[in-house]
Amino acid sequence: MGKPQNIAICGAGIGGLTAAILLARAGHSVRVFDQFDTPQPIGSGLMLQQTGLAVLGKLGLRDNIEALGSKIDRLWGLTTPSQRPVLDVRYAKWKSELYGLGVQRGMVFNQLLDAALASGVELVGSTDIVSVDAVSGTITRQNGSSIGPFDLVIDALGVRSPLTRAPKRDLPYGALWATLPWPKDSGFDAKALEQRYHKASKMTGVMASGRAHADAPESLTYFWSIRADQEQAWRGGSLESWKEEAETLWPETGVLLDQFQSHDELTFARYRHRTHPSPISGPRLVHIGDAWHAASPQLGQGANMALLDAWALAKAIQDAADTPDALKQFKRLRNGHVQLYQWMTWLFTPVYQGDSTALPWLRDWLAAPLSKLWPAPPLLAAMVSGMIGSPMGQLKLRVRP
Ligand SMILES: Cc1cc2nc3c(=O)[nH]c(=O)nc-3n(C[C@H](O)[C@H](O)[C@H](O)COP(=O)(O)OP(=O)(O)OC[C@H]3O[C@@H](n4cnc5c(N)ncnc54)[C@H](O)[C@@H]3O)c2cc1C
């Protein structure tokens, strides 16, 4: 579109800030609204894949982010008590130059925020959004006041967006998360996301997650899978008994568990699965990231998907003749990849987090041996990298050589 547009972005998360940077740099007037009083990230460690890294490269942030992240070569999981490997995905099995990047969400957020402000984006906090008129492009806040109208409103409000119509479905499990300093002389593999399982009802994991800033220590993200309806009982229960249970599942994590003095040091994230039928809700309202498609982080794609969405939308706005055409192009660029990964994540989640005994049995005794046979190793690496469905070519993105 030749003419600069007046664009509102709801949500200053990964997707919202990325879209803001790209659109502001393309000459549009961009305002980002968020509920927070002062900008801050939510959540813990993240795994960036080559898809998301390619977008960060286009923003000029990739080198900074890679310098502060931890390169991950493989995902590795053992089932207990047998200690049999049941997850072994090595990125290099698909392409030797592939890797994931473990990062602290706050670090990525700060990089995006600085770039957004430097690109002329106006950030407006303390704005609790409840609805948007998709025809006029007017935003309504919780206090009843309205903002706009805008040529286009982008919903990047994440998994709890009030602007989407699809039913919200909570998954039974979530996880407790904490970021901790990397313990010296520990046996953890700094280049792996490691997990331990007992059936699918117990899971714990450790992922190297880099540094918050250049002077900060190396960190890891620790997580413990838990049913959402047991979180309150866990918080009211004995911390020491839980530590014993967690240490039994993975004895090496004792050195991490010793650091927890209170339940409050672990943050609970409930997972949700939801795919809005279309990212377009009207002539002036479009959804990106978790607001369009939320899933459990089992395949580690959500932030990467939000980055791809933001890139695709900015590209469509650049290439299209008008807003309706831009929204159609955006949907065409992203829909296939989004639907495919939503479907795969839906299938995989109960295999690693759930109450079924049959699924983990199949995982351990059928899927794990089969996953070692060609072509499973390169296919699994491509899946975890976010590359199934070839999302990059049509977006003119490339895996960095
Ligand atoms: C525990 C956990 C681990 C994860 N691990 C990974 C991983 O390893 N790899 C990966 O790729 N993805 C991972 N994800 C998923 C990833 O975090 C999300 O997919 C991603 O953050 C989505 O980005 P977004 O921009 O769509 O939304 P968000 O980043 O959630 O941003 C939404 C923004 O909207 C604001 N907001 C919300 N509601 C309102 C409102 N009503 N009014 C105003 N502002 C509002 C919020 O304050 C926030 O700033 C994980 C998620 C969780 C919970």
Image (cartoon, grey):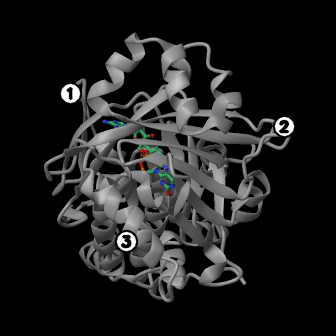
* Residue type of the residue flagged with mark 1: Gly
What secondary structure is found at the residue carrying circle 1? loop
Q: Which residue in the structure is indicated by mark 2?
A: 184
Q: In whole angstroms, how far apart are the C-alphas of marks 1 and 3?
A: 56 Å
Q: Which residue in the structure is indicated by mark 3?
A: 366
Above or below, comparing residue 113 to residue 134 in the picture:
above
* Residue type of the residue flagged with mark 3: Leu
| Residue 141 visible in the shown view | yes
In the image, is 58 to the left or to the right of 81? right
Q: Residues within 10 Å of mark 1 (few under 14, many from 20)?
A: few
How far across and down, in percent of the image, does residue 17 sit?
51, 52
Picture quarter with the C terminus: bottom right
Labels 1, 3: front one: 3
In the image, is 283 to the left or to the right of 24? left
What secondary structure is found at the residue carrying circle 3? helix
Picture quarter with the N terminus: bottom left
How far across and down, in percent of the image, does residue 3 sit?
42, 73
Labels 2, 3: front one: 3
- The mark that comes first in sequence, 1 or 3, is 1
How far across and down, in percent of the image, does residue 68 sit?
76, 51
- Taking depth in this image into account, of 201 and 31 the one nearest to the observer is 201
Residue at the spot x=63%, y=48% of the render? 207
How far across and down, in percent of the image, does residue 96 sit?
70, 83
In the image, is 159 to the left or to the right of 94? left
* Residue type of the residue flagged with mark 2: Lys
Residue at the spot x=66%, y=78% of the render? 92
Q: Which residue in the structure is indicated by mark 1?
A: 144
- Taking depth in this image into account, of 29 and 49 the one nearest to the observer is 49
Q: Residues within 10 Å of mark 2 (few under 14, many from 20)?
A: few
| Residue 5 visible in the shown view | no
Residue at the spot x=55%, y=33% of the render? 248
Q: In whole angstroms, how far apart are the C-alphas of marks 2 and 1?
A: 53 Å
